[in-house]
């Protein structure tokens, strides 16, 4: 499942991070790695960007960027 | 005896409390400037401690030292090139894992690093316990616990930093990230190549250089190729072959694999030093966000905060503004009484004091605005604002944070453009600066009120509203246009941290506010001074004008005429006559003033420019008024007053004068549109120049705005005429 398709309150484990070099490296450097657990805290009122919790810290990501990330074990 | 001096750099993630610690160490003894060539803020302070002169440099807050953003390049180059004696890495204890990423990179560069485990109180309240001794032992570096906002541990930190700087330990053997076998092999191969084949290697750690080359780091690659001379082709080939080898081995780019491995190394450390006890307590920050970024409440609350900031800045700020204004008037009048009439007096009063005074009155607004902005930033609300607005701003190709400067533009472009410093990406910053002047500033409002009130009567409100709306539309169009042409490239990825809410510290708010105020006074002062003097000179030279009639003689004649009459009249009749006389004299003086402006250089320029303004329905008087608007838009109305011969500066008279001057509603509309879009005032231009750090962008902004203004006004005026208005 793509990260951008997840709903508020869902959690999952990152399986793959795609996208171009800069964005991808940025995401990785913020500690969003393969195998990391993420939790979708909420979407902004206009449905973009989204807020997620990774390792206890809150990060926001645009939906189009989240569409580059694949997530497993969504519950 | 000359004191020994040490340079200490503070590095750390954004929101790690770095600035708080910096403020605590340096207090008011800090200097804020720019890093050379860029508009990223550079803060430094010098203190004397333990017998040393300590030069403390606050590096930009970054998550990494990969040279993607200006901040990262600056931070890295400082550590590489200026070799600070010690680098203090400020670590957010509640976010140890991510903080250590930057730490591993600092370690690889091979500088003397010291850890400040900051905000230890927050970490422990979240049930995170860090074994500092173990961490210190594992990474072989000193670790100090600090609580920045309570000023705890800062002395120990400085003491350890000095100790570390003085120690002669060899940092090379220290524990660093070990990559897997294949990568290590490639590193040593590249290293061997660098060692044996390059005559003058870069003065950086060799292992680090090899790692960066494997990661395809553009800056390091460029620098080493410059030094490689005839070996550069071989080197490029070697790098390429190692990268291809690794890429096929791991089925991914080497830099990605290496980032992964660094986090793996970090995970190992975390496992040994961190113990997390049971479930964390209620997260207050999360609860606040349930309200502040709520689907329904988020926007209303945001709008309320912005409204409040606006009110404070422009309504409350209006009182001190008036005090300043009357102070300046007082100064002007008392100087006027002291100085003998003449050129010097004119220059001082009408040129310098009037010109600079008209800008200095904005100081209270600037201070209040930046107090609010600092409050937003320090509490953590700014990133929530960006979170809320990003969708809308993204339509123009901008970051959510660009909303604040654009909105402030409705008040005054000068502080608005100064707030663009909150944007990280340079392209975003330049783009926001270019479109902010289209947000119609409050100084333009009197012009609209005059013109719309005169020519559109009951519909004035609608017309003025439409003008404001047009400004927004033009900014959107301009934004989209430039984003897809001049400032192309994806806008900065929106991987943004929403840091926990924190209580702001008054000290830091005041420091922030005062920095801006100082910057405003210093830089604006210089440019405004020159600008005012130039405009004053243009409008008061040549001194000896040949008037169409001898005004002094005329005034004397009127005076004599009434004096004869008053002598015979008495009581109320005398008073009436006196009033009549005053009116007649004022009228003559007004004609004289008007003729003086007309025949001054400014008037001549206006007349020379008249053919340019004719196609948009503005006569020479209008063009002179628009020219004087270069100093400050407020002046446009008073110039119109002088030129259209209104007896006093009362608006009713001016209205009548305008109505009988041949100006039509259509030409008034064209003029309003021109005012909305044309070149901003000299203070704004100075700010644009300062904040873009580029004369090219400044000139571009001026040219673009003015030509857009002319073309739009032309279209409106000619189209209106064609369909029979006007």
Image: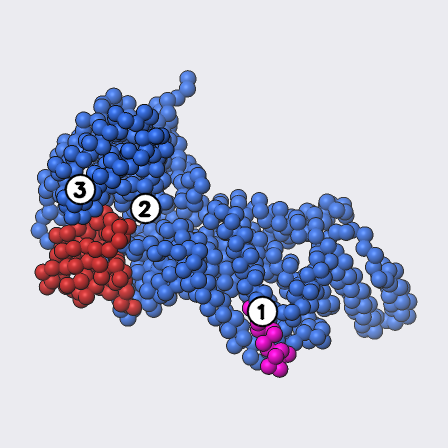
Chain colours: A red, B blue
Q: Which mark is residue B68?
A: 2
What's drawn in magenta, residue-wise? B712-726
Circle 1 is placed at which residue position? B713
- B713 falls in the magenta region: yes
Labels 1 & 2 near each other (Cβ < 8 A): no
Counting from the top left corner in percent of width and height, residue B35 is at: 42, 40
Q: Chain for mark 1? A: B
User: What predominant SS class does the magenta segment belong to?
Assistant: helix
Q: Is residue B321 visible?
A: no
Tell me the CA gap for discs 3 and 1.
61 Å
Lower sequence index among marks 1 and 2: 2
Counting from the top left corner in percent of width and height, residue B466 is at: 51, 73
Instruction: From the image, state whether disc 3 or disc 1 is nearer to you.
Output: 3
Snapshot quadrant of residue B233: top left
Asked if residue B120 lies left or right of residue B198, the reply is left
Residue at horizontal 28 percent and vertical 33 percent from the top:
B234
Q: Which mark is residue B246?
A: 3
């Amino acid at each position: 499942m793509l990260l951008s398709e997840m709903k508020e309150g869902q959690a999952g484990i990152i399986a793959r991070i795609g996208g171009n070099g800069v964005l991808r490296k940025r995401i990785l450097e913020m500690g969003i790695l393969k195998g990391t657990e993420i939790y979708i805290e909420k979407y902004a009122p206009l449905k973009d960007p989204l807020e997620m919790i990774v390792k206890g810290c809150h990060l926001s990501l645009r939906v189009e960027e989240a569409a580059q990330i694949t997530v497993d074990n969504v519950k | 005896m000359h004191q020994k001096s040490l340079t200490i750099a503070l590095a750390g993630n954004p929101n790690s409390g770095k600035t708080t610690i910096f403020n605590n160490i340096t207090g008011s003894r800090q200097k804020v400037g720019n890093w050379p060539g860029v508009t990223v803020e550079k803060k430094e302070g010098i203190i004397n401690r333990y017998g040393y002169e300590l030069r403390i440099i606050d590096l930009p807050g970054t998550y990494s030292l990969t040279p993607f953003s200006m901040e990262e390049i600056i931070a890295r180059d400082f550590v590489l090139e200026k070799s600070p004696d010690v680098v203090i890495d400020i670590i957010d204890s509640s976010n140890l894992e991510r903080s250590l990423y930057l730490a591993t990179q600092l370690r690889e560069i091979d500088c003397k690093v010291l850890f400040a485990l900051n905000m230890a109180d927050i970490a422990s309240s979240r049930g995170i316990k860090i074994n500092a001794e173990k961490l210190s032992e594992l990474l072989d570096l000193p670790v100090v616990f600090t609580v920045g906002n309570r000023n705890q541990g800062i002395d120990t930190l400085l003491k350890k930093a000095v100790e570390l700087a003085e120690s002669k330990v060899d940092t090379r053997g220290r524990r660093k990230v070990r990559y897997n076998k294949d990568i290590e092999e490639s590193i040593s191969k590249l290293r061997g190549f660098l060692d044996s084949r390059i005559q003058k290697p870069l003065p950086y750690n060799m292992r680090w250089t090899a790692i960066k080359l494997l990661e395809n780091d553009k800056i390091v690659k460029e620098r080493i190729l410059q030094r490689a001379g005839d070996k550069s082709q071989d080197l490029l080939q070697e790098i390429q072959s190692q990268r291809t080898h690794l890429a096929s081995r791991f089925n991914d780019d080497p830099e990605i694999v290496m980032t992964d491995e660094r986090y793996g190394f970090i995970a190992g450390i975390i496992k040994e030093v961190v113990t997390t006890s049971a479930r964390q307590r209620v997260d207050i920050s999360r609860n606040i966000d349930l309200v502040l970024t709520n689907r329904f409440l988020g926007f209303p609350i945001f709008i309320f905060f912005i409204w409040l900031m606006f009110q404070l800045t422009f309504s409350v700020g209006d009182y001190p503004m008036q005090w300043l204004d009357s102070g300046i008037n007082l100064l002007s009048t008392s100087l006027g009484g002291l100085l003998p009439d003449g050129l010097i007096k004119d220059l001082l009063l009408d040129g310098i004091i009037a010109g600079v005074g008209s800008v200095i009155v904005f100081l209270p607004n600037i201070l209040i605005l930046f107090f609010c902005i600092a409050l937003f930033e320090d509490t953590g609300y700014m990133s929530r604002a960006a979170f809320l607005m990003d969708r809308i701003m993204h339509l123009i190709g901008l970051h959510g944070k660009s909303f604040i400067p654009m909105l402030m533009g409705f008040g005054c472009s000068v502080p608005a453009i100064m707030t663009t410093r909150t944007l990280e990406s340079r392209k975003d910053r330049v783009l926001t600066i270019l479109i902010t002047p289209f947000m119609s500033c409050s100084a333009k409002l009197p012009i609209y009120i005059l013109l719309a009130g005169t020519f559109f009567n009951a519909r004035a409100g609608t017309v003025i509203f439409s003008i404001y709306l047009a400004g927004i539309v033009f900014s959107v169009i301009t934004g989209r246009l430039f984003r897809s042409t001049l400032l192309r490239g994806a806008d900065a990825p929106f991987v943004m941290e929403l840091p926990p809410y924190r209580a702001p510290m008054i000290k830091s708010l005041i420091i922030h506010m005062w920095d801006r105020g100082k910057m405003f006074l210093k830089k604006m002062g210089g440019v405004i001074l020159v600008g005012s003097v130039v405009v004053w000179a243009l409008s008061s030279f040549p001194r000896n004008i040949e008037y169409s009639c001898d005004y002094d003689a005329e005034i004397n004649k009127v005076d004599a005429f009434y004096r004869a009459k008053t002598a015979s009249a008495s009581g109320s009749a005398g008073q009436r006559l006196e009033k009549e006389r005053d009116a007649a004299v004022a009228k003559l003086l007004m004609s004289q003033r008007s003729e003086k402006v007309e025949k001054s250089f400014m008037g001549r320029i206006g007349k020379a420019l008249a053919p340019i303004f004719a196609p948009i329905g503005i006569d020479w008087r209008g063009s002179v008024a628009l020219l004087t608007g270069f100093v400050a838009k407020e002046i446009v109305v008073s110039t119109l007053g002088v030129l259209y011969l209104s007896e006093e500066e009362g608006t009713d008279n001016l209205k009548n004068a305008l109505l009988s001057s041949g100006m039509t509603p259509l030409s008034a509309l064209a003029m309003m549109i021109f005012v909305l879009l044309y070149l901003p005032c000299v203070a704004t231009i100075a700010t644009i120049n300062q904040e873009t750090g580029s004369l090219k962008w400044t000139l571009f902004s001026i040219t673009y705005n003015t030509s857009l203004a002319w073309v739009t006004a032309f279209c409106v005026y000619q189209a209106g005429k064609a369909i029979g208005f006007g």
